Image (tube, rainbow, N blue to C red):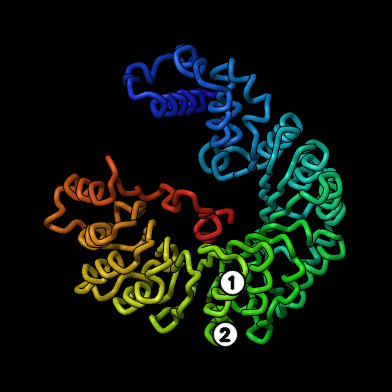
Amino acid sequence: MNEVSETRIIVLHASLVKKRSKSITKNEAYKPRHALSETRFDHMPDVVIGKIMSYLHWLEREWLVLAIPSMARIINSPLAWENFENDRTYPIDVLHMYYSVIVTRELIVIQRYGRYFQSCSIWLHSLVGAEECGDSDCLLLKAITENCTNLKLLSIMHPPDVTLTDFKSTSSYYMKHIKSLAAKRGESFRLCLSRLFYSSVNTIATGIVSYLLYLQENDLLRHISCLDFSHGLVFDAQCASYMFGLVNCENISILKCPIHSVNTTIVLSMAKKKLKQLYLVNDDHTQEAGFLEKMYLDWEKISKELARKKKKKRFLMVHYIFRNRAMSHEDLHPNPLLHSLIFDNLSSNISAKLLRRIADQYGSTLRILAFCSNYWEFLMHFADLGEINESFKYLGRNCVQLTAFLSCLSLPSSALVCLVMSSRSVSTVRVFKENVRLATADKPEGVFLLKMARALGLRKWDMVKKGANIFKIPNVDCRLLFATCFNEF
């Protein structure tokens, strides 16, 4: 372990220890790692240490053992490996590791600790390559099949632009190992499939439809608990089609798809079974297809039917994701099941009318509101700045369930203060520091931060610096909500 890595784990260790005790001093936090171990970790229950380790990247778990040898008893037990994910953002972007080295290390971890994994999330860089290649992702599924004897859930994040032809040409290690794993683990085994394309070059018939048939042929539909086929970069408006085959996936609890691939009948059928989370993407392809939500999705009917059957308030959570398209207040339709509303890289601005429509249409159920922006930042912004404070007050007063607000757009500080001071429920606000323009009443910056902290009921609140990950909301699967904002997703 190099000096940079060692320093990182010592500081990480110190930060974890600080959370466990208010009495730790600044000097003590930077004592040698063995002194920290003797004074802190040795007195923690193994279950607590295992929970802490489960939040670390798998590389950091190994470093922790190198820094504190007594942690070997935890890493060699199920406590530290409830979940394994080969997230490559950290080793590539921060540690500058080579791809081949990462794959080799991942294989070693799976072989050494795989028997402890309860769930496993695998990012496939490519489906191209022979199984004999020692540095290929194709070996990961094989290693999981051979070593993960207690696995309950396998999540696969597919590479971009993958087609059914690719799946079939690589079936010797893709479908073969998934089938083998499902056979070994039995009926309780669950499969999560993400980043699938809903259409091929010209038709949906050779896209997700064919892939679901392929899964059915291999007797895997019953194992799917999460399905994401919202990635469709090439689309012919003539191929818009409802996915009636989805009703055969009896165990799906999470579905992310284009809004024009479902209708009232499909949603009702799935929700009456096990569907709990429905992510609906409404993008430029939806506009090209001429899809009209109010004609094909009767949310009032769905809500009433489910209320009669399940007798619960939150029987289905619907998440709207509007991305890569123009937007007006007239595009928002009533939905009593709406939980999250995401505007991602719109090609139009956010008007005062749109903000008020959000409050009027979804005020009683909306929990998460986000305005994301990436390469279209110069197009997507808040308009009607003369009314923005009143618009945010209106949002705060009328969105009575709103708990999280996130914005990548430029905003006056006064608007944020109006939002949180008018709301009784908002507890999370994520904004870039560089995008907040301080009003005269909020200067210096410390005054604004103190106002926000008090309004949110927090001891301390701060803005997010550019370069840091803004897409973090407690108890939310942010990679499903903010898919295009993650490099790998």
Q: Report x, y in % for residue 160.
A: 65, 61
Q: Report x, y in % for residue 326.
A: 44, 79
Q: Quadrant of residue 167?
A: bottom right
Q: Mark 1: few, some, or many residues within 10 Å (few <14, many ≥20)?
A: few
Query: Residue beneath label 1, please?
Result: 308
Which mark is drawn over residue 476?
Answer: none
Q: Report x, y in % for residue 315.
A: 56, 64
Query: Which amino acid lies under the numbered mark 2 shown in the image of this protein?
Result: Phe
Q: Residue at x 79, y 71 (%)?
A: 210
Contact between marks 2 and 1 (CB within 8 A): the answer is: no
Q: First in sequence, mark 2 or 1: give its number.
A: 2
Near-viewer residue (160 or 32): 32
Q: Residue at x 53, y 53 (%)?
A: 477
Query: Which amino acid lies under the numbered mark 1 shown in the image of this protein?
Result: Arg
Q: Mark 2: few, some, or many residues within 10 Å (few <14, many ≥20)?
A: some
Query: Residue beneath label 2, please?
Result: 291
Closer to the eye: label 2 or 1: 1
